[in-house]
Image (cartoon, grey):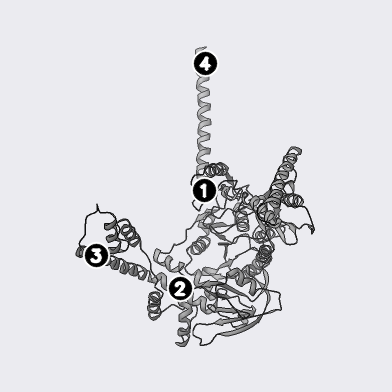
């Protein structure tokens, strides 16, 4: 994302028409417009001003000009792409924190768990970590005020502040008798772009990049240099779940892998100033002969797609995982005044081979009705039309990589060279994850593990007693997993009038005399039968949960390690990576030189050779035919 700074402006007392015109002008809608477009634009502005003025002056209740203008702007941005956004002061500050990676705070990640504000993990090296705040701690008060019913946004607002100022939080900890007050000084908190790097199996280096904030390039370089000192023979660069960030950092990160003067990304927009090409300005730090795999998935977006696309297009390494998100648009911050800003999509990203990273569905929304996640909208034809328009925009062009000429494809996003799907947990396990019971159990059992002097290290695995305790904990929380059979039976009971067993059936008989009459004994018997089926299905659901004991054991291990070390610790990271299917595939591919090399060679080489042979045969046959025709013509003469 690019940030364009504007001169500071002061509104003062500007008429409503002036505000409306100013708002639209700074949105950049008049840039490079033709004379005819300008005339039409001014007419539309006058119409907008007339509506705003009449509402402001004549509406039955007083409406502030601020509300009118704010909502007018939001209406304008709503019909554009999903990434064009209007920011007021609070949202703008949050955006700057995300891109700059720094803020004044305590250094904790928080969430609402069981309706209580809870510390998920303290960030290593921060005031909260030094003060002894632990994962699972419940924050009952902030500066003496109860957090009951507080939202995450409000909590963050109270915990953050100017560096050097103090805040007191009241903590309730599992296993402790009394709540404790912690008074902590706020500091600038640096959010790491590279939370983990290290050597994994077979001398393969691993670097995880989670965001492209201001220090991303420097952190990646530091991590790679440390791995090179350890003599790694290959590198896995993990961009999964990386939503992107700053464009200059995407270029800087790409430079670590690509030769000097390599095209990394180009941008194209309506305004000539947005048409740019970015090249590598330095030599790579990763040796060109070192095997490289880039891990991506559906949540890799924007800057992540620039880096993975450049590496793929220059045949510098292989891309492994799942097709990326397809967020290939440039957002420019255009300040409207000191407290309001618009983030406007001004261009699209293109990879070195010419592929547009942006998916059609991430482009302009138009003025159709709102749609649900499935993209349906009852009674609306506008969305059907826009859907067809999006289909027509899909790029079906086949492109070629820059060095070896491998075939790569448009349509948005980066398609991996080797697609590896993640292992999806079984339905019962997914239900447990949704309810967050692993974290809850780890927090409740942690004091007992400490009393038992259980060694929680890199080799830790929950024992039988811990597993048994987990299932007892599930019963105490009244956790229920509804199997497919149970759902079908509930549907049957509802349709048959048995939703509440005999009671509802009895009512149905009274309401509909034409239905057969049931004696009390028959109703009682039916009630028993329904209860028996319910009981069988409940037990079956419990067995379904218990049958996933291996997966449950691993997830419990991760949750307890998380509780012990927090998410920034190497032991926790390595525990998570040990069962990573996509990572294992990437390591396997770059560890085998023959397999790795074959992936960087055009897959249609054999077909091309056959085509060349056929072309030669066709030429020979054509010559032979010409000779024969000549002989026939000569004989005829």
State which tag comes first along the sequence, 4 or 1. Answer: 1
Report the number of numbered marks.
4
Disc 3 residue crowd, few under 14, some 14–19, many 20+, Cα 10 Å: few
> Which residue is identified by label 4?
633
Q: Position of residue 42 (x, y in %)?
A: 74, 43
Disc 1 residue crowd, few under 14, some 14–19, many 20+, Cα 10 Å: few
Q: Quadrant of residue 153?
A: bottom right
> Which residue is identified by label 2?
438
Task: Please give the label number shown on residue 529.
Answer: 3
Q: Position of residue 190 (x, y in %)?
A: 66, 72
Task: Please state if 208 lies on the left or on the right of 508 as rendered.
Answer: right
**What SS does tag 1 mark?**
loop
State which tag comes first along the sequence, 4 or 2. Answer: 2
State which tag comes first along the sequence, 4 or 3. Answer: 3
Disc 4 residue crowd, few under 14, some 14–19, many 20+, Cα 10 Å: few
Look at the picture and state if 483 lies above or below 139.
Answer: above
Q: Position of residue 31 (x, y in %)?
A: 75, 46
Please say whether residue 553 is visible from this viewpoint: yes
State which tag comes first along the sequence, 3 or 1. Answer: 3
Q: Position of residue 570 (x, y in %)?
A: 55, 75
Mark 4 vs mark 1, CA separation in Å: 46 Å
> Which residue is identified by label 1?
603
Q: Quadrant of residue 530?
A: bottom left
Mark nearest the camera among 4 and 2 is 2
Residue name at image x 19 percent, y 65 percent: 521
Residue name at image x 65 percent, y 50 percent: 76
Mark nearest the camera among 2 and 3 is 3
Closer to us: 323 or 609: 323
**In the current view of this chain or complex, which residue is farthest to the front?**
60
Task: Please state if 47 lies on the left or on the right of 136 as rendered.
Answer: right
């Amino acid at each position: 994302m690019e940030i364009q700074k504007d001169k500071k402006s002061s509104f003062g007392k500007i008429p409503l028409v002036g505000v409306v015109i100013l708002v639209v002008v700074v949105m950049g809608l008049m840039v490079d417009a033709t004379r005819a477009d300008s005339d039409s634009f001014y007419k539309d502005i006058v119409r907008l001003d007339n509506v705003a003025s009449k509402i402001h002056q004549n509406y039955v209740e007083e409406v502030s000009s601020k509300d009118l203008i704010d909502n007018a702007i939001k209406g304008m941005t709503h019909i554009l792409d999903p990434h064009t956004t209007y920011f007021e002061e609070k949202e703008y500050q949050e955006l700057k924190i995300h891109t700059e990676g720094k803020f004044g705070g305590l250094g904790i990640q928080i969430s609402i768990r069981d309706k209580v504000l809870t510390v998920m993990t303290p960030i290593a090296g921060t005031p909260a970590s030094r003060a002894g705040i632990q994962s699972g701690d419940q924050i009952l008060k902030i500066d003496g005020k109860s957090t009951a019913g507080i939202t995450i946004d409000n909590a963050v607002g109270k915990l953050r502040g100017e560096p050097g100022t103090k805040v007191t939080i009241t903590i309730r900890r599992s296993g402790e008798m009394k709540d404790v007050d912690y008074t902590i000084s706020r500091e600038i908190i640096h959010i790491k772009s590279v939370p983990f790097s290290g050597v994994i199996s077979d001398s393969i280096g691993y670097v995880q990049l989670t965001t492209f904030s201001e220090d991303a390039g420097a952190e990646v370089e530091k991590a790679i240099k440390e791995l090179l000192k350890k003599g790694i023979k290959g590198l896995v660069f993990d961009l999964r779940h990386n939503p992107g960030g700053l464009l200059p950092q995407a270029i800087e990160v790409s430079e670590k892998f690509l030769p000097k003067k390599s095209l990394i990304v180009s941008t194209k927009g309506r305004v000539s100033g947005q048409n740019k090409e970015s090249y590598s300005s330095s030599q790579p730090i990763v040796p060109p002969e070192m095997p490289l795999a880039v891990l991506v998935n559906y949540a890799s977006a924007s800057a992540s797609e620039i880096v993975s696309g450049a590496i793929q297009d220059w045949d510098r390494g292989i891309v492994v995982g799942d097709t990326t998100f397809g967020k290939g648009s440039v957002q420019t911050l255009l300040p409207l005044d000191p407290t309001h800003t618009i983030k406007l999509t001004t261009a699209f990203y293109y990879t070195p081979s010419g592929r547009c990273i942006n998916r059609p569905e991430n482009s302009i929304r138009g003025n159709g009705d709102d749609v649900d996640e499935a993209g349906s909208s009852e009674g609306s034809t506008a969305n059907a039309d826009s859907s067809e328009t999006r289909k027509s925009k899909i790029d079906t062009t086949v492109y070629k990589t820059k060095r070896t000429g491998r075939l790569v494809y448009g349509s948005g996003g980066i398609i991996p060279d080797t697609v590896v799907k993640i292992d999806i947990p079984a339905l019962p396990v997914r239900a447990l994850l949704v309810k967050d019971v692993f974290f809850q159990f780890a927090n409740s059992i942690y004091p007992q593990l400490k009393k038992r002097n259980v060694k929680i290290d890199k080799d830790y695995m929950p024992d039988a007693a811990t597993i048994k305790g987990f299932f007892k904990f599930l019963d105490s929380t009244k956790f229920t997993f509804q199997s497919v059979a149970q759902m079908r039976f509930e549907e049957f009971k509802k349709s048959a009038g048995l939703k509440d067993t005999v009671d509802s059936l009895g009512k149905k008989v009274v309401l509909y005399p034409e239905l057969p009459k049931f004696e009390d004994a028959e109703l009682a018997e039916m009630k028993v039968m329904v209860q028996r089926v319910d009981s069988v299905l409940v037990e079956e659901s419990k067995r379904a949960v218990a049958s996933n004991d291996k997966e449950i054991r691993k997830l419990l291990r991760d949750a307890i390690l998380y509780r012990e070390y927090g998410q920034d610790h190497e032991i926790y990271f390595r525990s998570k990576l040990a069962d990573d299917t996509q990572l294992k595939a990437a390591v396997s591919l770059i560890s085998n030189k023959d397999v790795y090399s074959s992936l960087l060679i055009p897959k249609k080489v054999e077909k091309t050779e056959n085509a060349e042979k056929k072309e030669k045969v066709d030429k020979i046959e054509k010559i032979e035919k010409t000779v024969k025709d000549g002989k026939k013509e000569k004989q005829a003469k």
